[in-house]
């Protein structure tokens, strides 16, 4: 979850690569995945779609145990707000979601009013 991503885990990021235009996305999910390389498009093994990923600089060291690199990936599930606007996340957002406009290399990003989209009060006659 984004709240569990610490600054020291992403300080070796040099670039975020977006695979689609995130301008109209209220939120993206982010996670740290163990990947075999510092750069390049990672394999994606979740439902939904990969929206973007981080590239690491040459100073990033692999895990001694596995030889992998921890890199951020940004993704959406089929039931997220962008494809089902009146669904589960018509208001609120998943715990690991952040507003993509608040993201940059080495920055965790944050939730905003746009990503959280509070429920609208019910109108009574």
Image (cartoon, grey):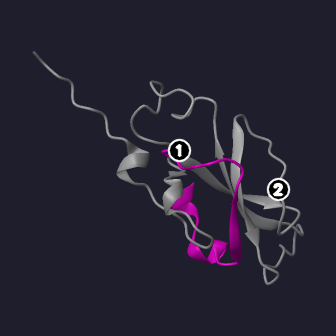
* Residue 60: % across, % down: 78, 79
Secondary structure at numbered mark 1: loop
Q: Residue at x 58, y 65 (%)?
A: 5
- Name the residue tied to disc 1: 25
Q: Which mark, by number, is residue 41?
A: 2
In space, the residues marked 2 and 1 are separated at their CA atoms by 20 Å
Q: Quadrant of residue 17?
A: bottom right
Q: Say few, some or many: other residues with alpha carbon within 10 Å of mark 1 (under 14 / 14 to 19 / 20 or more).
A: some
Segment colored magenta: 1-26
Q: Residue at x 66, y 46 (%)?
A: 75
- Horizontal arrangement in the rendering, residue 15 relative to residue 3 (left or right): right
From the top left corner, tell me how far across and down residue 6 is, in percent.
57, 70
The quadrant holding residue 77 is: top right
Tell whether 38 sits left or right of 83.
right
Q: Position of residue 36 (x, y in %)?
A: 88, 63
- Which mark is first along the chain, 1 or 2? 1
Kindly identify which numbered label has been placed on residue 34. none
Quadrant of the drawing holding the N terminus: bottom right
Residue 108 part of the magenta-drawn span? no
Q: Quadrant of the C terminus?
A: top left
């Amino acid at each position: 979850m984004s709240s569990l991503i610490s600054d020291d885990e992403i300080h070796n990021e040099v670039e975020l690569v977006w695979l689609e235009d995130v301008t109209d996305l209220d939120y993206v999910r982010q996670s740290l995945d163990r990947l075999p390389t510092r750069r390049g498009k990672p394999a994606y093994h979740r439902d939904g779609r990969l929206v973007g990923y981080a590239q690491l600089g040459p100073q990033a060291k692999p895990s001694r145990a596995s030889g992998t690199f921890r890199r951020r990936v940004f993704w959406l599930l089929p039931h997220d707000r962008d494809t089902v606007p009146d669904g589960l996340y018509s208001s609120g957002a998943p715990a690991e979601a952040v507003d993509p406009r608040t993201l940059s290399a080495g920055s965790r990003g944050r939730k905003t009013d746009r990503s959280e989209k509070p429920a609208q009060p019910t109108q009574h006659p």
